Image (cartoon, rainbow, N blue to C red):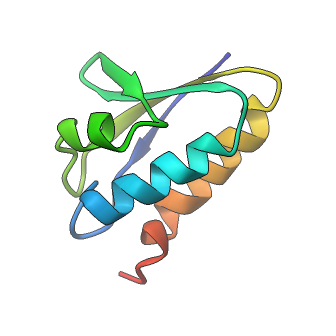
Amino acid sequence: MIKTQITIINKLGLHARAAAKLATTSARFSSQIQVGVDGKLVDAKSVMSLMLLAASQGTLLDLEIEGKDEILASETIAELINDFFGEGE
């Protein structure tokens, strides 16, 4: 199991488009992927669950990944977040 933290750096935070990109990216992996704030973890493959986190810019997300492709999943998700969800901010 991989447990790590990553900071939301894009200006709009985990808004609808960013949440959809994170959920779509997470769904590509067979591993169980959960993200959360302050100990509240949700399924990273669910757009609605991600949006309920209300993670704004600067929020430190907890990331827990478990499964056979957990390393690749962790790297891919970190890349997505650190690339401002592809929104060029």
Quadrant housing residue 88: bottom left
The quadrant in which the N terminus is found is top right
Residue 29: x and y in percent read 71, 38
Which quadrant of the view contains residue 39?
top left
Q: Is residue 7 above or below residue 44?
A: below
State which quarter of the image contains the C terminus.
bottom left
**Camera-nearest residue between 2 and 86:** 86
Marker count (numbered): 0
Q: Relative to the observer, which residue lies in front, 49 or 68?
A: 49
Q: Which residue is found at the position 42% from the left and 69% from the top?
A: 84
In this rendering, position of residue 25 left or right of residue 22:
right
Q: Is residue 88 left or right of residue 13?
A: right
Question: Which residue is painted at 65% across and 40% down in the image?
Answer: 74
Q: Residue furthest right?
A: 68
Q: Percent x, y for residue 14?
A: 28, 54
Residue for point 31% across, 40% down: 50
Which residue in the rendered view is the most extreme toward the bottom? 88
Please state the horizontal and vertical placement of residue 77, each as a whole percent of the image: 58, 49
Measuring from the top left, give residue 63's x and y in whole percent.
48, 30
Image point (50%, 62%), residue name: 82
Q: Nearer the viewer, residue 68 or 1?
A: 68
Relative side of 16 to 46, left or right: left
